[in-house]
Amino acid sequence: MKFKKNILCIGAGYVGGPTMAVIAAKCPDLKVNVVDVNAERIQAWNSDRLPIFEPGLLDVVREARGRNLSFSTDIAAGIREADIIFVSVNTPTKTFGHGAGMASDLQYWEKTAYEIVAHSDRAKIIVEKSTLPVRTAEAMERILQENKKGLRFEVVSNPEFLAEGTAVKDLLEPDRVLIGSRQTEEGRKAAEEIVGIFARWVPGDRIITTNLWSAELSKLVANAFLAQRISSINSISALCEKTGADVSEISYAVGSDRRIGPRFLSASIGFGGSCFKKDILNLVYIARSYGLAEVADYWQAVIRMNEYQQDRFVQTIIREMFHTVVGKKIALLGFAFKADTGDTRESPGIYVARKLLEERAILAISDPQALDNARRDLAGLAGEVDYAADPYRAADGAQALAVITEWRDFQALDYEKVFASMRKPAFVFDGRNILDHRRLFEIGFNVYPLGKPSLTHFA
Ligand code: NAD
Ligand code: UGA
C-alpha cells in the first residue's frame, strides 16, 4: 500500500511508543516507524510483552502494528525514508559538569540532530516531542541548517502532556495539543502539517498553535504548576497534623472553588516520576541563568517541599515506632511512583526504602507492576529486602505497613488476615490516604494517615 506520508519517531520510550501507536491507529494512511538504540526495547515493542505497562496500550499497538506501525533499530534507514521526524529521546537532568543536578542533559537530543543531518537526502519537518529547555529549537535549527547538502529543515515544537497510567486516554482525548513553530511562511506550513495529523481525532478548538519558544516553555510551566499544587497541599498536610485539621476535607473545600478546581490536590508522600523534578530544576536553572533569582527561588521551593514531605513520612515511621526500626520488618505497599504504571523513576519509594534500610529495618516490598524496577533501584544497598508479588507475604511477620503507591489492590486486602499475621503492636502509615483508617483502627492497627489525626490504641 502507498502511504501518504512517512513518519518517524526517534526514541521508543514511555512517550514515543504510546504516542506513535495512537497516531498510527488513528491515521491508517500514514506509515509510522519508531526507532531506538535499545534493541531489547524494540524487541519488546514487537512482542505482546510491551516494554512499559500502560492500560489499553497493547490493544492500540496490536491494531496498527504490521499494518502501518513498525518498531526498528535501523535509525539511518528510518531517517532516510521519513517526511516528518518526531524526536522523543530522554532529556534527563545533567549529572556532571556545569549545571550538574539542575540543567537538562541534551547529549541524546543533540546526537539525533547530527544523525538526521547525516542520513537525510531531502528536506524534512523535525518535531520536538521531548521536553526541552526554552530555545532548544534554535540549537537544533543551527545544527540542521549547517548541512552541506543544501537541505532545509523546519523545526516544530509539539510537547507531550500525557501522564503515565492514563497515557492512552490522554492521547485519544487530550485537553489540548500544542504546536509551536517559527512565525514565517515555512514555519506555519510545517505547523499546519502537524496540526493535520492530530486533527484526525482531536477537535480543532483543542489544537493550539503558537510560536516555538512559547510551546517549549509552556511544557515546563504546565509541569511546574501541577507539581506546585501537590507541594502546596503537602505543606498543608504537615500543618494539619499539628492542628487536628483534616487535609482531605481541606482539599475538598478548597478544590470546590471552581477557580481552583479539585484535581492534583491529593496529599501524598510526595510527587515522583521522571519529569516533575527534572522539569522544575530545568526551569529554575533557566531562570537563574537569566539572572532571575527570585523566580528561580520561587520554583525551587516546590522541590524543597517535596523532599521535606518524603522525609517527614520516614521520620513519622521512625518516631512512632518508638524511635527505632532496627531489625523490624516493614512492608512497603507499592513502589511505583503512582498507580497503574510499573515506572519507579524518582519514586518516593526509593527514598523511603533507602532511609529505612539505613536505619536497619528489614523491608518487604509488594507492587503489582514495579518489582523488577524496584530490584534495580535498590541493587547494591546494604540490608535485607524481600520482593513479594503477594502483599500478604510482604505483611507476614511485619510490624508496620507503609503505603507508597495508591494501587486499588491495596484497598481490597483482607486486613483482619493481614493484622493476624503481623507483629504487635502493628502500625499502618498511609502515605496516600487510600485505606479505611477507622476500620483498620477497629481491627487493632495503630493508624497514621497523612495530614489527619492518627488513630492509636496507646494510652
Ligand atoms: P524514555 O527514557 O522512556 O525513552 C527515551 C528513549 O530514547 C530510550 O528508549 C532511549 O534508548 C532512546 N534514545 C536515546 N537516545 C537515542 C538516540 N540517539 N537514537 C535513538 N534512540 C535514542 O523517556 P520518556 O519517558 O519516553 O521521555 C522522553 C521525553 O518525553 C523526555 O524529554 C520527557 O521529559 C518527555 N515526557 C515524558 C513523559 C512521561 O510520561 N514519561 C510525558 C511527557 C513528556
Ligand atoms: C506528569 C503530568 O501530569 C503530565 O501532564 C506530563 O506530561 C508528565 O508529567 C511528564 O511531563 O512526564 P506523570 O508524572 O506521568 O505525568 O503522572 P502524574 O499523574 O502527574 O503524577 C505525578 C506524581 O504526582 C505522582 O507521584 C503522583 O502520585 C503525584 N500526585 C499526583 C500527588 O501526589 N497528588 C496528586 O493530587 C496528584
Image (cartoon, helix red, strand yellow):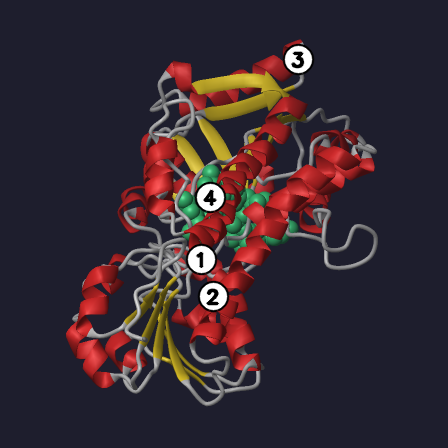
Q: Which residue is mark 3?
A: 183
**Label 3 to label 1: alpha-carbon separation:** 39 Å
Q: What secondary structure is marked by label 4? A: helix
Rounded to the nearest angstrom, the CA distance separating label 3 from label 4 is: 40 Å
Q: Secondary structure at mark 2?
A: helix
Q: Which residue is mark 4?
A: 233
Which quadrant of the figure contains the C terminus? bottom left
The answer for how far apart the CA atoms under marks 2 and 3 are is: 45 Å
Q: Is residue 68 above or below residue 394?
A: above
Instruction: Name the N-terminal-most of marks 1 and 4.
Output: 4
For the residues bearing labels 1 and 2, Cβ distance under 8 angstroms: yes
**Pair 3/1: label in front:** 1
Q: Nearer the viewer, mark 2 or mark 4?
A: 4
User: Which comes before the other along the chain, label 2 or label 3?
Assistant: 3
Q: Where is residue 36 drawn, in percent x and y?
A: 55, 53
Question: In the rendered image, which residue does mark 1 sit on?
Answer: 337
Tell me: is circle 1 under 8 Å from ligand 2: yes
* Contact flag, marks 3 and 1 (Cβ < 8 Å): no
